[in-house]
Image (cartoon, helix red, strand yellow):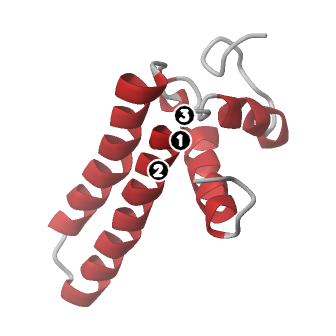
Amino acid sequence: MPTVLEKKYETFAEFYPNYLSQHSNRTCRQLHFVGSTLVLLALVALMVTGALYWLLVALFCGYGFAWIGHFVFEKNRPATFKQPLYSFLGDWVMYWQMLTGQVSF
């Protein structure tokens, strides 16, 4: 089966199961969750303060935590490099599914 990076997916529905397969390591998923939560907090800080540097904080937290999870724990390349939009959507779908217990921490 091709990895997320080897195949160009036409639909998110086709992409997402493979996206999840690239997040089998629990620590990787946990780092995604922490990073995404920090993104949300940084965006709230942006709205409250109007300070644009919170956008940089959001980007650093979102990608930094996820990429550490992939390179160090999952030992694969993030799907962001090949399909950035589907990867971004996958991050938030997985985040919601973790919050609702559909995907384990």
Residue 26 location (% of width, % of height):
53, 41
Q: Which residue lies at the image location 45% right of the left edge and 19% below the top edge?
A: 75
Give the structural element (helix, strand or loop) at label 2. Answer: helix
**Where's the N terminus, which quadrant?**
top right
**Where's the C terminus, which quadrant?**
bottom right
Work out whether 14 lies above or below 99.
above
Quickly name the residue at label 1: 26
Gap between marks 1 and 2, in whole Å?
6 Å
Work out whether 55 lies above or below 70.
below
Gap between marks 3 and 1, in whole Å?
4 Å
Q: Is residue 60 left or right of residue 82?
A: left
- Tell me, yes or no, whether the two marked residues, 1 and 2, touch with CB atoms within 8 Å: yes
Quickly name the residue at label 2: 30
Q: Which residue lies at the image location 34% right of the left edge and 74% below the top edge?
A: 41
Residue 67 location (% of width, % of height):
37, 34
Quickly name the residue at label 3: 25
- Tell me, yes or no, whether the two marked residues, 3 and 1, touch with CB atoms within 8 Å: yes
Gap between marks 2 and 3, in whole Å?
9 Å
Q: Which residue lies at the image location 40% right of the left edge and 71% below the top edge?
A: 40
What label does residue 38 carry, if any? none
Q: Is residue 6 left or right of residue 43?
A: right
Callout 3, which amino acid? Asn
